[in-house]
DNA sequence: TTGTCTTACTTTCCAAAGGAAAGGTAACGT
DNA sequence: ACGTTACCTTTCCTTTGGAAAGTAAGACAA
């Protein structure tokens, strides 16, 4: 089922293939530091177990010598379900071993009661499982549930979820029982970070950050191949970095938080104040800004400035190779972009400005896919 | 010479003994996860090579059964020199394997020319070497040079040092040639962080930060056993987090930097403005504050507030188990302490307030000791 | 066609490392 | 004295991956 009965190097080889597509055995050896003999043995073993297969075009060009026989991952070897839980709905995705999404479903939640939600998750997973059967492959290998808030993925418990008002819920156990499938849970931003680490804009980077801008503003940090969880479950809380003046009060009760000026809610509120239109929506504000309304544009400018400062904090503190900017807020990115960049380059210290800023509009399904990747990690990156 | 001819587990065992004093073989097995047999083998091998010795009181209490025979590190097995280079002087320390300082020297620098400094380092190391001979043990095993600025410890080059105005100086190679002893170099704050990680307030913590407050304000981060270097050599730049208002301009040209209000220089300058006394020194400012001068006290309060915000940023972003506060500024810590703590608890998000704040007055020799520890790391934590 | 060159892959052999398990050892209590 | 307990040692064995020699498959040239 897992790689447990494979040699340790098998995980290394599989990871390399997952991240870098079809490769010849020789190339795998070069990248992993294994000898050619070792690669052959591992590859044979992985092939016997259906994890990889020969075929696929080699990435390398023609040369002298014997032509290479590339091997590649068999994506259908294992399927995973990822479920993102919000206060209002469940978003589910079925993904294969290479994290390609095969199906997705959304379900509204009418109750935030633990039992109800667990049942809804189980039903959603069953639908995805049915879709998996349509794919004509084996059963689900694992389920990954992601949720915002304080999640202890080791224990498998949700320590505290503000949106659902849950405390110390052993969600992994509950979902595992309800679905009959091994289940892991993880904080939503961290799961998204893991997905980017293995299959997104973080592949191959030793250290990077993922910042999501939207209803909330959060971040995931990946250092030396592991996503930082923080000693107390708190990490990547860029939304509450105190960098944006003292005039607005954040939902957390403080002043100065990035979220107090740059969250969707904060932007709408400020735009309403600026225009005097108490009914203004985000879309309306974006339209006004696009038509050049100076007051609304100033709101976006300030938000962009705050986000830029937050990115500078991240860059100055951990020195990432790249910061991936994402989230619903990215839809109106053109309104912030210059201000984000400007504030960032102004306040990034020294070589920290060399940090690469990348914008990725990750749709909501991507968040659910993060869950699937976390579940898949149990297979291809065991015991980390 | 090194642990190279010892089994891989030897490093693990030696590290455990270095960090947790005399332990019985059984206890080592429990802590490292090795079997009893493996520990015996490794211990025998380490003992044959002089790294450890039987003896020392066991930390555990009397119980039934055969009494334990504790083993402990032989500190004199290897000696290391640590040198901290500043713009004005060299500080050198001779330390043993357990990082205990055996001797220390200071030398004024009258030139910042590379050749001159290298020569002065070599002379200083020779003096320490002489002291080592007095100790009646073997020769120096390694030299660790630390220096503030952008240091690439892999390459062994100082990429940029503002204080010395050096660029791309292959210092490790130069010092190694001049002293005839294997030499490593490292950024000074990172070296201090490594020292705390192995032998200080960071022992046993999975994630912690060290913040130094003084002429500059910097930090070292230790995540999952490794000190973060940053992709571009920049990391832990808390001094330039933009959290402290826009009225004062930092040396980096920006406004809002913590250093602009909380560095020694900034405090003196603000105190001079507040009192109108253009000759006021730091000591004078501290005296005035202690006698209750409200204007000067406000300067310290603001500095403490800024440092507290910076600590909150660190806590919110990486979620350390502990933040060690250190540096020359700690001398007047009583003037800041409450404001630091207040700003920290106000702005630390959620469980991040559980982060432990510890004050450690690390004298300047400790910085040099950091270099010795970095050099020693090459022995007991190879190839990390 | 044939030989040589180059690179890819496979096979065989082997040394290292640490686990499992059994045995030896030194204290205590009865 | 004897059992109990926990520590330590020894022996044996599996696993793992490296070294090195051998095989395969194409290009190229004579």
Image (cartoon, coloured by chain):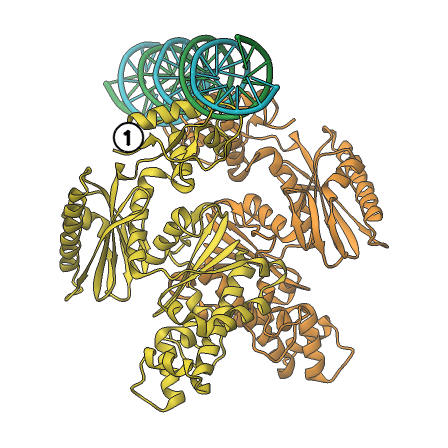
Chain colours: A orange, B yellow, C cyan, D green
Residue A6 in picture, x, y percent from top left: 55, 24
Task: Say whether residue B61 is visible.
Answer: yes
Tag count: 1
Write down the quadrant of residue B71 in the picture: top left
Q: Nearer the viewer, residue B92 or A373?
A: B92
Write down the quadrant of residue B162 in the picture: bottom left
SS of the residue at dot 1?
A: loop
Residue B21 in picture, x, y percent from top left: 40, 39
Residue furthest out toward the bottom: B276
Task: Say whether residue A36 is visible.
Answer: no
Image quadrant for the C terminus of chain A?
A: top right
* Callout 1: chain: B
Residue in the image at 35% along x and 80% along y? B268
Residue A277 vs D19, above or below: the answer is below
Q: Nearer the viewer, residue A79 or A235?
A: A235
Residue A106 in picture, x, y percent from top left: 79, 50
Left or right? Give the position of B365 relative to A171: left
Residue A143 in picture, x, y percent from top left: 71, 39
Residue B198 vs B163, above or below: the answer is above
Residue at the spot of label 1: B50
Residue in the image at 75% along x and 82% along y? A277
Left or right? Give the position of A143 relative to B60: right
The crowd level at tag 1 (other Cα within 10 Å; few <14, some 14-19, many 20+) is: some
Image quadrant for the N terminus of chain A?
A: top right
């Amino acid at each position: 089922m897992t790689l447990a009965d494979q040699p340790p190097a098998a995980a290394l080889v599989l990871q390399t293939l997952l991240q870098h597509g079809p490769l010849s055995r020789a190339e795998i050896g070069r990248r992993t530091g294994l000898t050619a003999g070792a690669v052959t043995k591992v590859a044979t073993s992985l092939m016997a177990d259906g994890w990889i297969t020969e075929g696929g075009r080699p990435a390398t060009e023609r040369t002298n010598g014997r032509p290479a026989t590339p091997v590649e991952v068999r994506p259908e070897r294992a399927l995973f379900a990822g479920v993102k839980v919000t206060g209002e709905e469940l978003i589910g995705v079925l993904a294969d071993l290479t994290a390609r999404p095969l199906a997705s479903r959304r379900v509204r939640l009418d109750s935030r009661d633990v039992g109800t939600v667990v049942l809804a998750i189980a039903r959603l997973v069953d639908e995805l499982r049915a879709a998996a059967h349509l794919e004509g492959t084996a059963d689900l290998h694992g389920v990954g549930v992601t949720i915002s808030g304080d999640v202890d993925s080791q224990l498998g418990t949700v320590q505290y979820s503000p949106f659902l008002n849950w405390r110390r819920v052993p969600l992994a156990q509950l979902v595992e029982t309800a679905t009959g499938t091994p289940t892991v849970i993880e904080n939503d931003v961290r799961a998204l970070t893991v997905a980017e680490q293995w299959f997104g804009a973080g592949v191959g980077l030793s250290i990077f950050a993922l910042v999501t801008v939207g209803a909330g503003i959060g971040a995931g940090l990946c250092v030396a191949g592991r996503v930082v969880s923080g000693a107390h479950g708190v990490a990547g809380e860029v939304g509450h970095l105190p960098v944006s003046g003292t005039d607005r009060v954040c939902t957390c009760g403080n002043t100065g938080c990035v979220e107090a000026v740059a969250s969707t809610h904060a932007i709408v509120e400020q735009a309403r104040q600026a225009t005097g239109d108490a009914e203004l929506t985000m879309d309306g504000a974006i339209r006004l800004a696009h038509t050049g309304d100076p007051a609304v544009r100033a709101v976006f400018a300030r938000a962009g400035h705050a986000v830029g400062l937050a990115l500078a904090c991240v860059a100055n503190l951990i020195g990432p190779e790249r910061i991936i900017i994402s989230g619903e807020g990215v839809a109106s990115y053109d309104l912030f972009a210059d201000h984000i960049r400007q504030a960032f380059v102004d306040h990034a210290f020294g070589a920290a400005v060399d940090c690469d800023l990348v914008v990725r509009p990750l749709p909501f399904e991507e968040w659910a896919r993060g869950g699937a990747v976390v579940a898949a990690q149990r297979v291809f990156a065991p015991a980390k």
